[in-house]
C-alpha cells in the first residue's frame, strides 16, 4: 500500500518547484517582465547560479566513495541506448538518422538531475539520493554531454560539407581538414571540446571534481567564508531556474510544437524507455534496494534543460525537445506518475515496474491530451 | 581586546554579501548583462524575492514577545530625529527646508535592515539579533516608510500648487481639494497610503504581521509545503539584491554624485548621527547589554534601499541618497568600521562609543577620499 507519508514527501518536494514555475508563468503572462528581462534572469541562472550549485554539489561528493555499481548501471544504460540507437540509425539509412539517434538518446538517458532530481529524490528517498545524484551529475557533465555535443558537431560538419552552407566555423575547420584529407574524428572532438569549454558548467564541474579529489584525499574542507560566498548565489538556482522555465513556457505560442505523434514518442522515450532500460541495466549489474529505486526514478525525471539548449543551438529537433518541457505543466499528472513509480518499484513484485510505469504514463498522456485539447 | 573570533564573525558575515555585489559589478562592467537584463533581476528582487523574505521574517517573529524597550529606543530615535529636523526646517525657513529634513531623517534613521542587517548582525551577535531585526522591520515598513512617503507627497502637492506643474495625480487631488478648501492632511495621507499600497513589500509586511498575530496566539505554524514554496524564492533575495546593487554601481558614470561636502554630511548623518542618537535614546529608555549593542550597530548599517528608491521617484535629493550606496564599495573600510564599532560598544568604557565611531568614520572617510581621488 502507498502510505500517506509517501504521498506527502513527493508532494512536499515538488510543490515548491511548481510554485516557482507558476510564478514565472504568471509573471510573463501578465507582462510583469519583458522578454529581455526574463532573458536576464535566465542568463543569471545559466552563468552563475547553476554552475555554482553544480560546483558545490560535486565538490562535496566524496569521489573515493562513489557507488560503482550505481555508476555502472547508469553508464550501461547510456551505452546500451547509444549503441541501440546508433545501430538503428545505420539500419534505417535515412539521411537524418543520426539526428534522430542523438535526439532519442538525449530524451531517453539525460534527465534533469540538478534542478529537479535533487529536491524530488530527496523528498522520495532522503539524503542517500543526494550523493548518488552528485555522482550522476559528474558523469553527465564530464562525459555524456560531451558525447552529445561531439555527435552534434559531427553532424554539423557533415551537413556543412554536403550543403556548403554558411557554418563559418565548421567550414574553416573543413577547409583545413580537406588539405589533410575529413574531418578527422580527432578534429571534431577538438571542436566539440571548444564548445563544451564555453559552458560555465563545464568549468564548475571540472573544478568541483578536482577539488573533491584533493579535499577528500587530504581531509580538507572549503572554508565557510568561501562556501557561504558560493552559496549566497547558488541557493537561488532552483527557484530562479523553475521561474525561468515558467516564463519560457508562457512566451511560447503553443504547446506540443512537434505534433501529437512525435510528442507521444518523446514521452514514451523519456518516461518509459529511459526508466525501463535503467531498470534492466541496474538489475543486470546487481543493483538492489534503495540504489535501484533511486536509479529508476532519476531516469524518469523530466528532460535535462541542457539537452534542449543544444537541440536549439544546433537546430536538431528543438521542437521535440521543447515538448519535453510540456510535461512540466502537468503537475498533477507528474505527481501521480512519481507516486505510481515509487509505489511500483517499492512493491515486492518487481514485475509491477513496467505495468505501473505504463499505467502512469497512459493516465498522464490522456490527461495531457484532454488538457491541451480543451 | 578585540578577539580574532570577533573579527572572523564579522568578516564571515560580510564577505558573501560583497562577493555577490562584486559579481554584479564585474558582470555589468564586462557587459555580460545588458541594462534591461539587470533591470529584470532587480525587478525580480523588488517584486518577489524581498517581499517574500520580509513575509517570512515578520511572520516568524512572535508579536506577543516583542522587546518593547528595544522598540521604544528605536521609535524614540526616529521621533527625536524627525522632531529635530522638522524644527530645524521651520527655523531655517528655506524653501526646500522640508526636503532637507526628509532626506536627513531618512539618512539618519532608516538603515538597510533586511538585506544587510540580518546577516551582518547575526554574524556579530548571533540569533538574538534576528528577532530584533524582524521587530525593527515591522515598524519600518508599517510606520516609518509611510511617514516618509507622506512627507514626500505633502511636498509634491505643495510644489504642484506653487508651480502648477504637470503632476497629474497631485493636480487632480488639488482640484478636488480646492473645491472643498488644501489639500487636507487626511487627503495627503490617502495619497501616501495609495503609493504605499503599490509596494509589494507593504502587503507582505502586513500579511506577515497579521499571520504572526494569528499564528502565535493559536500556536499555528505555516505548513512546511507553503513555507518551502515561499523560501524557494526568498532565499535568493540577499544574493540577488547585492548582485543588483553591484550592477547598479557599475552602470553609474561616477561616484559621489552630490559633491564631497554633501557626501561628508551624508556619511556623518548615516554613520555617526544615526548610531549616536540611537545610543542616546537606548540608554535613555534603559536598554542594556546585547540589545543595546544590536540597537547601535543596526543604526550604523548602510542606507535602506527603499529610501533611495523614494528619493529617485520624488526627485528629492536622489544624488545624496545614491552616495549612501557608495559606502558599499568600500568593503575594507566598512569592515574596519563594524569591527571598531563592535569593539567600542562591547568595551566596558561606554565613553569610547562616540570616540570609536568618530575614529572609524574619519579613517573610512580618508580612505574613501583617497580611493575616489586616485
Image: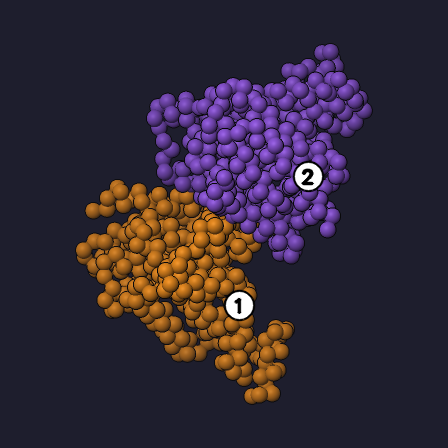
Chain colours: A orange, B purple
Q: Residue at x 33, y 48 (%)?
A: A123
Would you identify the image quadrant in which residue A303 lies? bottom left
In the picture, measured across the screen, residue A125 lies left or right of residue B298, that is left
In the picture, measured across the screen, residue B347 lies left or right of residue A124, that is right
For residue A267, above or below residue A237: below
Q: Residue at x 50, y 76 (%)?
A: A189
Is residue A361 visible in the rendered image? The answer is no
Q: Let me know if marks 1 and 2 both belong to one chain.
A: no
Is residue A286 visible in the rendered image? The answer is yes
Mark 2 is surrounded, within 10 Å at the Cα level, by few (under 14), some (14 to 19) or many (20 or more) other residues, namely many
Taking depth in this image into account, of B272 and A112 the one nearest to the observer is B272
Q: Residue at x 50, y 30 (%)?
A: B348
1 or 2: mark nearer the eye: 2
Q: Which residue is mark 2?
A: B323
Q: Please identify the residue farthest to the right as the structure is shown.
A: B163
Taking depth in this image into account, of B237 and B160 the one nearest to the observer is B237
Taking depth in this image into account, of B1 and A239 the one nearest to the observer is B1
Give the spatial CA distance, label 1 vs label 2.
Answer: 40 Å
For residue A151, above or below residue B319: below
Q: Which mark is on residue A197? A: 1
Residue A306 percent across, percent down from the top left: 48, 61
Amino acid at each position: 500500500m502507498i502510505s500517506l507519508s509517501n504521498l506527502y514527501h513527493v508532494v512536499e518536494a515538488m510543490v515548491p518547484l511548481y510554485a516557482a514555475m507558476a510564478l514565472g508563468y504568471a509573471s510573463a503572462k501578465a507582462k510583469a517582465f519583458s522578454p529581455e528581462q526574463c532573458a536576464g534572469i535566465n542568463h543569471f541562472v545559466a552563468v552563475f547560479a547553476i554552475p555554482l550549485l553544480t560546483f558545490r554539489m560535486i565538490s562535496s561528493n566524496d569521489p573515493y566513495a562513489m557507488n560503482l555499481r550505481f555508476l555502472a548501471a547508469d553508464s550501461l544504460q547510456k551505452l546500451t541506448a547509444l549503441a541501440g540507437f546508433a545501430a538503428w540509425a545505420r539500419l534505417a539509412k535515412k539521411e537524418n538518422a543520426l539526428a534522430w539517434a542523438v535526439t532519442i538518446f538525449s530524451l531517453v538517458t539525460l534527465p534533469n538531475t540538478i534542478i529537479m532530481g535533487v529536491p524530488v529524490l530527496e523528498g522520495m528517498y532522503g539524503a542517500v539520493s543526494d550523493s548518488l545524484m552528485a555522482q550522476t551529475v559528474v558523469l553527465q557533465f564530464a562525459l555524456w554531454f560531451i558525447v552529445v555535443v561531439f555527435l552534434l558537431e559531427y553532424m554539423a560538419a557533415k551537413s556543412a560539407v554536403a550543403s556548403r552552407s554558411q557554418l563559418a566555423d565548421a567550414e574553416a575547420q573543413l577547409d583545413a581538414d580537406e588539405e589533410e584529407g575529413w574531418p578527422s574524428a580527432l578534429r571534431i572532438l577538438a571542436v566539440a571540446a571548444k564548445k563544451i569549454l564555453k559552458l560555465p558548467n563545464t568549468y564548475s564541474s571540472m573544478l568541483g571534481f578536482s577539488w573533491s579529489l584533493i579535499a577528500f584525499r587530504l581531509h580538507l574542507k572549503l572554508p565557510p567564508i568561501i562556501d557561504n560566498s558560493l552559496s549566497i548565489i547558488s541557493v537561488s538556482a532552483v527557484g530562479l531556474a523553475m521561474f525561468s522555465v515558467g516564463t519560457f513556457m508562457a512566451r511560447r505560442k503553443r504547446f506540443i510544437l512537434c505534433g501529437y505523434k512525435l510528442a507521444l514518442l518523446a514521452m514514451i522515450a523519456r518516461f518509459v524507455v529511459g526508466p525501463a532500460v535503467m531498470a534492466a541495466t541496474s538489475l543486470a549489474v546487481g543493483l538492489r534496494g534503495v540504489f535501484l529505486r533511486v536509479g529508476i526514478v532519476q531516469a524518469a525525471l523530466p528532460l535535462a534543460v541542457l539537452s534542449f539548449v543544444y537541440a536549439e543551438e544546433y537546430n536538431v529537433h528543438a521542437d521535440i525537445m521543447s515538448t519535453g518541457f510540456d510535461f512540466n505543466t502537468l503537475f498533477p499528472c507528474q505527481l501521480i506518475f512519481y507516486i505510481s513509480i515509487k509505489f511500483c518499484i517499492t512493491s515486492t513484485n518487481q514485475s509491477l515496474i513496467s505495468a505501473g510505469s505504463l499505467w502512469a504514463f497512459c493516465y498522464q498522456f490522456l490527461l495531457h491530451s484532454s488538457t491541451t485539447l480543451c
